[in-house]
Image (spheres, helix red, strand yellow):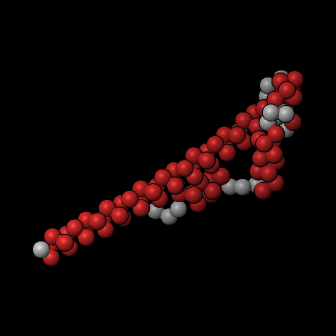
Amino acid sequence: MQLKERIRQTLAGIRWFFEDMQQVNRDKATGIIDYEIQQMENIFSLLVCGSFIGMASPPVHLTLQLLPVMEREVIQLFNSVTTARDALGELSEMLGEP
């Protein structure tokens, strides 16, 4: 009787461990997706506003029409320039230690 109870407790502990690991992996995956979206918004902002820094970009009249819609992206673009973040460093920090 006692052996069955110990086996049941051990299996419950293992199940609890793997449920926690699954939640941690979901949280990391969500963080990575958020980071990728942020980087894609930065790239989009650079592509649209590239004429301001000398990059090839869409026609200026199209860029000026998109600027009111891109307020958040432009603010994010200026913030990323001022902080000069290391994208690879941020991604490895998000993944954590192996």
Q: Position of residue 83 (x, y in %)?
A: 78, 56
65 over 97 or under it: above or below:
above
13 over 26 or under it: above or below:
below
Is there any visible trace of residue 43 in the rendered image?
yes
Q: Is residue 69 left or right of residue 34?
A: right
Q: Which residue is situated farthest in the front direction here?
A: 1
Q: Quadrant of residue 58?
A: top right
> Which quadrant is home to the N terminus?
bottom left
Q: Is residue 20 left or right of residue 49?
A: left
98 over 54 or under it: above or below:
below
**Depth order, front residue of 57/70:** 70
Residue at the (51%, 50%) spot, across then down: 29
Q: Position of residue 74 (x, y in %)?
A: 81, 41
Q: Quadrant of residue 3?
A: bottom left
Residue at the (41%, 60%) spot, across then down: 21
Q: Position of residue 44 (x, y in %)?
A: 72, 35
Q: Position of residue 78 (x, y in %)?
A: 82, 47
Residue at the (76%, 54%) spot, across then down: 84
Q: Which residue is situated farthest in the left direction here?
A: 1
**Depth order, front residue of 34/7:** 7
Is there any visible trace of residue 55 in the rendered image?
no
Residue at the (63%, 56%) spot, across then down: 90
Q: How many marks?
A: 0
